[in-house]
Image: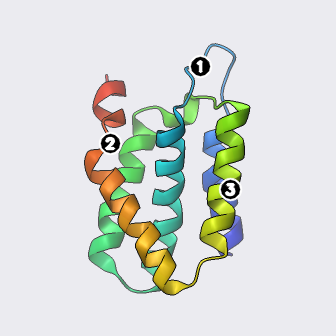
Amino acid sequence: MKKILLAGLMSCLFMGSASAKNLETDVALGMASLMFCTTFYSENDMQIEGAIVGQSMTAHRNAGIEEMVMSKATSDLLDEHMLKYNSANKEQKINLCEHAIKFARESDFVEANAS
């Protein structure tokens, strides 16, 4: 179930038209972290943290991240990021998710792309 959820959420990062804007690497990795950590926090009953990353993920999706395309280099880095998360133990995932919360608080993607 978890893999299906992540696959569905990740598909939004890979779709886009030829006229779409390029997705910056840090935003792609940050969005992936938000997705991973939404699931992680839910599975570990960490409601406050889950709300932070979940709201940020929704805001990024509403700001148009789904219409953007990524470069091959960004896609490769995203694959590495996914492997790192998937091979992490619980303590390492908590550390990775702290970075997702930082991204949620500091990302200017939503403001820059909202209209």
State the residue in front, 2 or 82: 82
* Mark 1 Cα shell of 10 Å, populated few (<14), some (14-19), many (≥20): some
x%, y% of residue 111? Answer: 28, 31
**How far apart are the alpha carbons under marks 3 and 1?**
24 Å
Q: Quadrant of the N terminus?
A: bottom right
Q: Which secondary structure, mark 3?
A: helix
Pointer 3 residue: 80
Say what amino acid the circle numbered 2 marks.
Answer: Ser
State the residue in front, 11 or 112: 112
x%, y% of residue 93? Answer: 50, 76
Q: Which secondary structure, mark 1?
A: loop
Pointer 2 residue: 107
* Mark 2 Cα shell of 10 Å, populated few (<14), some (14-19), many (≥20): some
> Which mark sits nearer the N-terminus, 3 or 2?
3
Residue at the spot x=36%, y=34% of the render?
109
Numbered badge on residue 31: none
Please identify, in this view, whether the residue under mark 3 or under mark 2 is nearer the observer: 3
Q: Which secondary structure, mark 2?
A: loop
